[in-house]
Image (spheres, coloured by chain):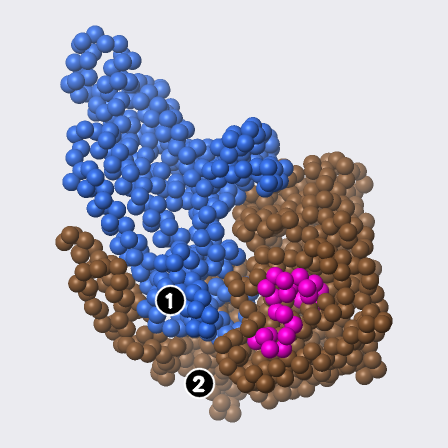
Chain colours: A brown, B blue
Amino acid sequence: MRKLYLLVAVVLVAGMALAACQPAVEAPVATEAPAEAPAEAPAETPAEAPAEAPAEPAALNPYIGSNKLDGNGVPPTFFADPHVRKGFAYAFDAQTVIDEVYMGEAIPSYVLSLVGMPGYDPDAPHYEMDLEKAAEEFQLADVDGDGVPAGEDPDDIWEMGFRLQMLYNTGNTTRQIYAEILQANLAEVNEKFVIEVLGLPWPAYLTAQRAHKIPIMTGGWLEDIHDAHNWYQPYTTGTYGARQNMPQDLKDQFKALLDEGVSLVDPAARHEVYQRFNQLYYDEVPGVPVALATSHGYEQKWTTGRIMNPIFSSIYYRTIGKTADAKDPTTITTANIGDALTLDPAACYDTASGEVLQNIYETLVFYDGEKTDEFVPQLAEEYSVSEDGTEWTFKIREGVKFHQGGDLTPSDVVYSFVRGLLQGGYSTPQWMISEPFFGVGKDDISMLVDDGASADDREALMANDPALLKQVCEDVKSKFTIDEANNTVTMKLAQSWGPFLPTIANNWGSIMDKEWVIENGGWDDSCDTWQNFYSMPDSENPFTPITNGTGAFQLDHWTPGQEIVMTKFADYWGDPAKVDRVVLKVIPEFGTRFAMLQAGDADFAAVPAEQRAQVDPLVSEIKVYNAETNTYDDPKPVCKIDTGKLGIDRFEICDTPNDRPLRLLFGRPGLTQDVIIFNFLIE
Amino acid sequence: MTNYIIRRLLLVPVILFGVSVIIMGMLQLLGPIERSALYVKDFPKNDRQVDGIIKKYALDRPFHEQYWRWLTGVKDPVTGHREGGVLYGDFGYSRSASQPVIDIIRTRFPNTVELALWTVVPMLSIGIWLGIKAAVYQNTWVDQLARMFSIVGTSFPTFVFGLLVLILFYAKLGWFMPGKMSDWANQVVRSPQFVNYTKLLTIDSLLNGRFDIFWDALRHMILPILTLSYINWATYVRVMRSSMLETLRMDYVTTARAKGLTEGVVINQHARPNAMLPIVTMAGMSVVGLLGGVIITETVFNYPGIGKATADAAANLDVVTTIGMAIFSGFILIISNLIVDVMYAVIDPRVRLS
C-alpha cells in the first residue's frame, strides 16, 4: 500500500505543479495530500483567479527588439509614420510571389476589391517594387519625431537602422515567403534594416494579433459575399482594421466611404465611391495587397458539366454527370481534406460543411452559372425591389417538396430567416444578414437587446427583461410580411442594401421546413422562447447532423471523420441530378488522394498548390479561363507538360488527343486575397 | 495470482486519474485565448467572437473548476438535467470530430482491434520464423538475407513505405485499396439485413454469410497489415535470432541432440519455446501499441481507427477529446499490460508474480 501512496502523491504533485504554471493563476498553489481515498482531493487554488493575465506595464514586446529606436528595435509608433509604410510598400516584390509561390498562376492585386466588382481597377494607383523609391521614403521618415527627416538625422532610422520581426503562422509557406522577400529587399535598401522572420503556431499567432502585438503580418481573407463591401470593410473598420490599431480619424474616413458605397445599388455609382476608397488606401497605405491566385482545378476526364463558380463552397454536383467509360458511372467520389462541422445552414461558416449544404438546401436566388454577380430564380420565381431599395419582394415557387415530405410555403421562408437572425452568434454567418436588416454595425441580435453586452452569451441574454426580449423578437418578425394570395414574402431592410441578393444567395440563406424544424427540437416560432436558442453551440444543436432541404440531393449518412454520402432526390422540382450518389470522403493525406486519382476512384480531389507539379503530368486536356466571356473555353488536348515552366506555358496545347486521365480547369481569378498590414500602434 | 490481478486492477482508477490530471494540467499551460482557437475554424471575423467562445466554454476559470466540471458535468439549476460528466459516462463533445467522444471510441475502436488482430499473426509468425532460420543457419546467406531484409524494413519511415506500397499495389496494379471497404459493401453493411454482431467487419461478414464483403474487407486491410508488419519484423528477427543463438548453446540442447532426437524436434520443441520468452514481452508491447492506434498508417491508408482521431484532436487542441482518448488508451494499455504480465507467468513456470 505504501507504493500506492507514493504513486498517488507523485501524480497529484505533478498535476498541481502543472496547474500552477497556468498563466491565469498568480499565487502558488496550496496542496493537501490526501489521507486515504486517493480518487479525490482536487488541487486547491486561491479563491479567484483573474480571467486574463494582468498586463505587466514594463514588459517588452518581443517582436520589436529593444522597443526603442536604437538600431536594435523599433518604437511602438514605428508604422504610424506614412513614409515608413510607403518604404515597406516599395520594398515588396509581388512579381516574385507570383512566380515562385503561385508558379505564375496569379494576378497582382492593386486594390482590395476583386475582378468584376465595383472598385476593381487594373489602372488604379499601386506600389511596385522600387528599391530606390523605398530608400527615398525611408529617408523622408521621421520616426523619432524631432522634425528632422531620417536622411539628415543621425538619430533616426536611416543611420541607426532598425530590427523587427515579421510573423507568419507555421505551415503557411506562402506568408513565410512574403516575409522573406521583405527581409531580403529591405536589407538591400539599407543593410542596417533587419527583418527577422518568425513562425508561430496558429493559436499563438492569433493571440498576438488580438493583443495588437504583431508589428507587421499578412491578413488573408476569403470572401463571404461576392461584393466589394465584403472586401473593403474587414481591412478598414472591420477585423483587420481593429488588429492594426488603425487611428480613429483614418477609420472614420474609411467608414464614411463604406457607408456610402454599401447603400448605393447602381454598380457604376458604387464604382466611383470605391475608387475614392482606393485612392485613400493608396495614399495612407495601411496595407499592401499582394496577389490573387487563379484557379487550377483537376477533374477526371469522364466527368461533364461542372460549373466552376469561384464563390461555390467547393463543388456543386447537380449538373455533373459521368460518361459511360467512367469507372463507376453512377457515383461521384470526391477526396476532400477536411470534414464538415455542422449541417445547420444558420450556423455553418466553413467550406467543408458549406459544400454539403449547397447541394442539399436551396436559397431564394442562385448564381447564374459561373457568374458571381448575376442571379437566377431558384426558390423565388420572381423578385423585385422597391424604389428606395429597402423593400424586397419574392414570389415563392409552388410545388416544391422537401426531402422529408413537406411542401415549400412562404411561412417556411420567413421562419428560416427569422430563426437565423434570432439564433445569431458571432461564429456564424448571421452577421451578414443582420446588417441589412438591423443596420450597419448591428451585426448580431444581441446588439438589439442590450447593445452587444450579451454577445455570444446565452445566459446573459436570457437574463434580460422578458418583455424586452419579446419585443425584439416581434420587431424582427415584423420585418417580414406574407401575402398568401400571391404567395409572396416581402422583406423590409433597415437601409438600402446594394449587395442584398449576393448576401442571401449563399448557404446561410437556405430555406428550411418550419414544421420539420419544430418537430425535431428547433425553435417553435414563439417570441417567448427564442432566447433559449441564441448562439447555440454545435454540440447542442439538433440540426448539426440532420438535414431536410429542397435540393437535388438528400443526405444518406454522415460518418464523422470519414465520409458524407448524398443520394439523388427523386421528387426534385427542377432538372434532376445526373448521378445517383455522391460520396465525399475525408482524406487528409495528399499521397492517398493522389493515389485515388490515379486509380480512378476519385473524380475530384483537393490538390494543394505545392503538389501541383506531381499531378500536372496526368493532365490530358485543359480548359482555359477567358476573361472576356467570363467563362472557360472549350477543352483542348495537351501534348507536353513541362513542370519547370511557369503559368500556362507549362502546358503545350496541340490537336492530338491522348489517354491521360485528367482534365484541368485553369486561370480563373479566385476569391481569396492576402494583404500585408502594418500595426499603427504596437502594444 | 488472483491477489496479484486484483491489486493491479485496483491501481487502474488511480493511474487514470493521474493521467487525466497531468494532461489537463499541461493543456492549461496555454492561455484561454489560445485554447479558444480550437472552436474557430478560420480566423475569427470579430474579436467579440473570441470573447464569446471563452465565456461559452468556460476557458478562463481556474484549473480545479475546469477539471471538476469535466468530471461531474454541469447541472442545469432549472431542469435538474445534468450535462457532461465523465463519471456519468459522458466524455463530452468532440469539436474536431463533430460527435460525442464516446461515439468516436465506439465506432472506431473495433476497427483498431480488427487491424491489430489481423496484423499480429503475420507480424509475429514471419518475424519469429525468420529469426529462427537466421539463428539456425547462422552466418550463411540465409542469415544475411534475413537480417538485411529486416533492417531495410526498420529503416523505412512508415509513411514512406506506406505510400510506396499504396502507389504500387493500388494506383498502378489496383489489387488492394485504402480505406475500410468499398462503397457497394458500405451500402450492404448499412442496410437493415446486415447484422453487426461483433462490429469487426471481417467476422461479421462471415457470420452474415457475405463472403464477398469479407474478401473486400481483407483487400482493404492487406496494405496496412503489410506496412505495420514489415516495420516491426527487424526487431523480432534480431531478438529471436540472438535469443535462439543463446538457447542453442545451452546444455539441454546438446543433451537433446545426444539423446538422438531429430534436428527439427530439437529446434522446435526444445529450443524455440525457451527462446520465445523475450518475444512474448515484445509481442505484448506490440499489441498494446497497435491497440493504442497507429496514427501514420491510419492516415496514409485512410483507415478509420482511433489513432487518427486522437491525432486530429491533439492537432486541433481539442482538450475534451484528447483527454477522453488518453484516458481510454491508458485504460487499454493498463489492461493489456496486465494480460501480458499474466501470460508471462502462465507460459514460463519459472516466473513468480510478486
Residue B148 percent coordinates (x, y): 37, 28
Q: Residue furthest top?
A: B260
Give the image quarter of residue B4.
top left
Tell me if I can see residue B12 in this picture: yes
Amino acid under disc 1: Arg
Q: Residue at x 63, y 87 (%)?
A: A252
Disc sitting over residue B69 in the figure: 1
**Which region is colored magenta?**
A507-531
Q: Is residue A183 left or right of residue A510?
A: left
Residue A222 percent coordinates (x, y): 63, 66
Chain of residue at mark 2:
A
In this rendering, is residue A155 above or below A178?
below
Give the image quarter of residue A70.
bottom left
Residue B105 percent coordinates (x, y): 44, 49
Tell me if I can see residue A282 in this picture: no
Q: Which residue is mark 2?
A: A155
> Which is nearer the eye, B159 or B337?
B337
Crowdedness of circle 2 by 10 Å Cα count: few (<14), some, many (20+)? many
